[in-house]
Image (cartoon, rainbow, N blue to C red):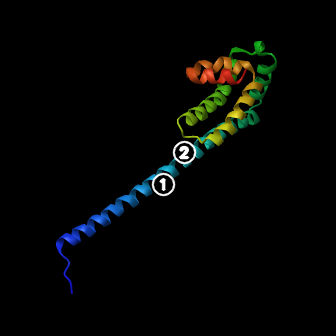
Amino acid sequence: MRKINLQTIVSIAEIITALAVVVSLIYAANEFRRSQDLTSTDVQTIVYERMLQMDVLVIENKDIADIRIKAAKTPEKLTAADSSRFLAYEHIFYDSWELAWTAFNEGILKEGAWKDWNSWFVAEAKRRPALGWIGNRKNHGKEFVQYVEANTK
């Protein structure tokens, strides 16, 4: 029977340790990818919930619905209070778009999801009253303002 010397035991331990490190790195990389996927999904959920919030505001508050119509047809007839409410309402839309834009530019939101959301945002922005963007553009970063204006002409 052959005896195992200390050097052999140390060599086996080093191999096992190296394998454990490799397995740990693979697991960590997998978890990182999975957390990125969840983050992309989370961004989409936040944007969707904000758009739903806008719908609920219109459904539950007749005044907001009336203000939206007036802003589209005769914005000059909005009172200062109604104008303020309309701009706050529209801020939800543009803030959500900027959230998605930023998440995409930071590599969080996946390209396919970004394309879908962005095409919807662009189309929606084109049909919204101009007052909403004009009154809210000061609330956004320079690059996002340029992006919106280049894509909604």
Would you say residue 87 is visible in this rendering? no
Residue assigned mark 2:
39
- Whole-percent x and y of residue 67? 76, 23
Binning the other alpha carbons within 10 Å of mark 1 as few (below 14), some (14 to 19) or many (20 upward) gives: few
Q: Name the image quarter holding residue 17.
A: bottom left
Q: Nearer the viewer, residue 50 or 118?
A: 118
Task: Give the vertical position of 18 relative to 133 (above or below).
Answer: below
Query: Residue at coordinates 56% horizontally, 32% vertically from top-left?
Result: 102
Q: x, y percentage for residue 55?
A: 73, 36
Residue type (three-letter) at the residue carrying disc 1: Asn
Q: In terms of secondary structure, where does tag 2 sit? A: helix
Q: In the visual, does 1 lie left or right of 57?
A: left
The residue at the point 65 percent across, 25 percent down is: 88
Is residue 58 visible in this depiction of the protein?
Answer: yes
Instruction: Give the residue number, with chain letter if any, for mark 1.
Output: 30
Residue at the spot 66% in from the left edge and 30% down from the top edge:
93
* Element at label 1: helix
Q: Is residue 78 above or below residue 102?
A: above
Could you tell me residue 48's position as x and y percent? 66, 40
- Residue furthest bottom in the image: 1
